[in-house]
Image (spheres, grey):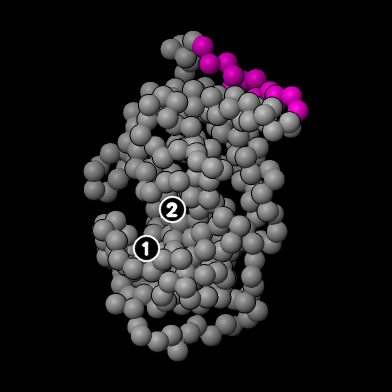
Amino acid sequence: MSPSSRQRRITPASGAYQRRSRMLLVLAPVAGFTLFAGAALWWFADDVGLHVPSWSTGAVVMDEPQLSVDTRNDLRIQLQLLQSQWQRLNALDALQGKGKARPAPAIALSLQPTAHISDADLRERVDILSRALDQRLFANKPKAGSGRLMPVNGVTPSSNFGLRLDPFSKKLSVHNGIDFVAPLGTPILAAEAGTVKTAGLTPQFGWSVELDHGNGITTRYAHAYRLWVRAGDRVNAGEKIAEVGSTGKSTGPHLHFEVRYNGAPLNPLRFLAAR
């Protein structure tokens, strides 16, 4: 359980711990190809009958989607979803009086016939259109400040964001965050100042904390051994909020860390800064 008091705190070594930075919402080009190059692909998956949470009232609503895929069929589906989303955005812009429809990158619109397109070409088309959609979707969102602080000192990620082999099902699935393997009890630190949205026990994440940083930005810290905060607490960047553990669906002591924008998972590595 969480300690009854919060008198023990991480003492800042420099002013960097006290920065109330804001995430720079510019999605840098991905290094190579990952299953969902940006948040965009989740939002209109219902077009082809996939059971993925959908776009609702301007916010993405989702709860731990784990989508197993067949690579080539999935690439075709992604291409169809991305084209559909682009068309829907054009329609929405027209309804809101934002002018003429925007053309998508030419190569990404060449969808037929997909049966004779190589896997590499499919990947390229998906990647190009996904990046263009991310830039379009996030173009007018708040842009101020710089990267967040690392949630665990002196540890590099052991499992990255995106497509990976699920350690339990042994199938390809989407990993919505990054993992930091660390000894049991290692301090988990708030990556940015914010308010504790939730702090408690769940079957998936075990003991976990979710911080709300405002402007639709949240971070999650999962599989903890012990929590140091409660819902409603205000925390500073670099403040100890939990300890590394292996609770919930876990293969050993580690921190599962997520960054989300209006519920959509983003690659945390884009927004983290070294201490």
Q: Which mark is residue 180?
A: none
- Secondary structure found at label 2: loop
**Predominant secondary structure in magenta?**
loop
Residue closest to the eye, 58 or 209: 58
- Secondary structure found at label 1: strand
| Residue name at image x 64 percent, y 62 percent | 22
Q: Is residue 183 visible?
A: no
Q: Quadrant of the N terminus?
A: bottom left
How far apart marks 1 and 2 lie (CA) works out to 10 Å
Residue closest to the eye, 176 or 160: 176
Label whose residue precedes the other's in the sequence (1 or 2) = 2
Q: Quadrant of the C terminus?
A: bottom right
Q: Residue furthest left?
A: 169
Where residue 55 appears, as percent x and y from the top left, is 50, 39
Residue at mark 1: 222
Where residue 157 appears, as percent x and y from the top left, is 44, 58
Where residue 13 appears, as percent x and y from the top left, is 59, 83
Residue at mark 2: 177
Q: Give the vertical position of 191 relative to 53 (above or below).
A: below
Q: Give the vertical position of 163 relative to 105 (above or below).
A: below
Q: Give the vertical position of 71 relative to 232 (above or below).
A: above
